[in-house]
Amino acid sequence: MSPEEILSTYGPRESMEYDVVVVGGGPGGLSTAIRLKQLAAEKGTDVSVVVLEKGGEPGAHILSGAIMDPKALTELFPNWKELGAPLNQPVTDDAWSFLSETGATRTPGIFLPECAQNHGNYILSLSNFTRWLAQQAENLGVEIFPGFTAAEVLYNDDGSVKGVATGNMGVGKDGEPTENFQLGMELHGKYTVFAEGARGHLGKQLIAKFKLDEGRDPQTYGIGIKEVWEIDPSRHTPGFVMHTAGWPMNNDTYGGAFMYHMEDNKIAIGYVVGLDYANPWLSPFEEFQRWKTHNNIKWYFTNDKGEVNAKRIGYGARAITAGGMMSLPKTVFPGGALVGCDAGYLNVSRIKGSHAAIKTGMLAAEAAYDAVVAGRQHDELSAYPEAFEASWLHAELNKSRNFKSWFKKGLTVATLMNGFEQFVLRGHIPWTLRRDKADHTYLKPAADCPKIDYPKPDGKLTFDRLSSVFISNTNHEENQPAHLTLKDASVPVSINLAKFAGPESRYCPAGVYEFVKNEDNSDRLQINAQNCVHCKTCDIKDPTQNIVWVTPEGGGGPNYTGM
C-alpha cells in the first residue's frame, strides 16, 4: 500500500494544535523552543511549543567536531555555567598544519587569521550538549517527542504551511501494515520551524516549493567523518586543537582534518571532504583512514615502541553545509521558517555552526512569539530575516562569504586569498565570488580520472566501514520500507556504474550501497538501509540525483553518545 492508500484506509489522522511546532531537536530547534518559553515567562503570555526529534532521544543523531563558540549560548542562558552546560574543556592551543606525505609545516600563530583562532571557545561533545539543552527546554515546559519523524509537510488551502505529519509506524517492507501498525499523527502550528540540520528532508521540499533559493548560489556541502578515541595520557594535551590540510588528498579537492583533545584522555578526530570533488574513485572514508597513518598523526595513537595502544570508542558521519552567505536561501515562507543548518548558516571558515543554529533559532523564536501574541498565524515571519541582517551573525558570515569558493582554484590560491581577505582586509572584502553548479554535477567519468588504491585496514588504527558503523550504535527496524529510495531502479547500473564506476559505494561512509552480481553475471545495486547513519551524502552527491533520502521509522539510525 502507498502512504496515500494507508491514510485513506486507516485515516483520518489524529491532530494536536500548538502555537509553534519545531521539527528537529538539535541546537537550532531546541533554542527556538527555549527562547519562545523564555519570552512567554518574561511577558506572562503562555505559548505552546512542541519539538519533534527523529532520533531515539535528543542528541542521538547529532554529530559535530565540535568546538563551540559560546557567544549565542551566553545570550540564551547567561548562567549556562551554573546550569551545568557540558562545556568543560576550553581550547588552550591552535595548530594549523599543511601535510605532505612525509612531513608537516605548521603555520606560525601570528599568521592565523581571526577565523582560525579558537581562544575563548570550548571542545565539547555536541550530542551530550544537545541532551543538556533538551533538559533545559523541558524544564521550561517545552514538549519534546523523541522517536517521531516529521515525514510530511501539511498545507492550508491557501498554500501556507499548516504543520507536519509524523511517519506511520509498523509498516512492513512490502508496504503493508503489520500487527504493530500505528498511523502517524498531525501536529498543527500557527508557525512551524524547521531545524532538521544539513539537507533536511522537509527543508529541501520547502526550498523547492517556495523557490526559496531563487537568485542564490547552489548550496554546497562537505561530508564530515568522525571518530572518538581514548589515548595514552602521555600523548594527550587537554584543549589542544589541530587542523590539517593537504595530504592525503590532492590540491584540487577541498577538505582537511581535525584533532581536538577533549577531557578524560579522549580525542575527537575527523575528516571533511567537499562534495564538489570530481574524481569518482575518491572515497572520503578511506582518505580519513589514510590520514591517520601519517607519522605526525599516528604518534598520538601509539606508545614509544610505535605500537597502537589507543582505543577507538565512537564513529559517525554527517553532511555539513558550506555555501555560507551566498547560498543562504530565503528563510521564511507563509507559515514557517528555516533555522540552523536546514538553511545553511554554518560558518565554514570557522568550521562552526552550532552558535549559528542557536542564534537563528532565537531570532526565529522572537519573530514567532511577537506574531502569536499579536494574533497572527500562517503568514511570513519577515521580522526573522530582518533581525538576522542586523545581527552579529550576519556580519560574521559576510566576512567569510568567499571562503569555500576560493578552493575551486586549488589549495594554494585558496590559502593565499583567504589569508589575504581575513588577515589583511579583516573581512572588509570589495568583491564577491559566485558559484553556479551543484555538487553532484562535478563528477567526471571514471575513465577520465586516476584510480585511487587505498590500503587495506589493519583493524588497529585503520578500519573498514562495517566495524565503524557497529560502534555508531546504528539500528533500524528491519521490516520497514527502505528509506533510501530510487526514482529509477535502472539508473545505478546503466549510468552510475557504467559511467562513474559506482561512486555511491565510495562516497557513503556506512557501506549502505554496494554493487553485486546477479546469477547471470549482470550487476545490481544492493541497498543495505540498516547501516544508514543519516548523513545525507547520497542525497547530495548522487550524480543523477536518482537517490532520494526519506524518513525511516522514528527512533532508527545512529545513537551517538560523546560524539
Image: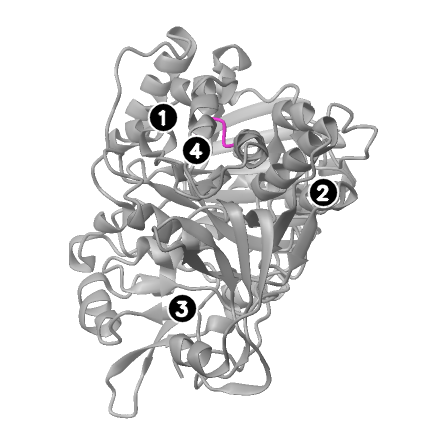
Q: Position of residue 96 (x, y in %)?
A: 51, 25
What's the amino acid at mark 1?
Answer: Phe
Main SS class of the magenta portion in the image: loop
Residue span colored magenta: 348-352
Marks 4/1: CA–CA distance: 15 Å
**Callout 2: 10 Å neighbours few (<14), some, many (20+)?**
many
Location of mark 2 (residue)? 137
Return the residue at label 3: 484
Which residue is situated farthest in the right direction here?
A: 82
Instruction: Give amino acid for label 2.
Output: Ala
Closer to the observer: label 4 or label 3? Answer: 3
Question: Is 207 situated left or right of 82 in this image?
Answer: left
Q: CA distance from mark 4 to mark 2?
A: 39 Å
- Label 2–label 1 contact, CB within 8 A: no
Left or right: residue 558 compared with residue 342: right
Q: Which residue is mark 4?
A: 245
Of mark 2 and mark 3, the one earlier in the sequence is 2
Q: Residues within 10 Å of mark 3 (few under 14, many from 20)?
A: many
* Within-10-Å neighbours for mark 1: few <14, some 14–19, many 20+: many
Numbered tag placed on residue 9 in the rendering: none
Q: Which residue is mark 1?
A: 403
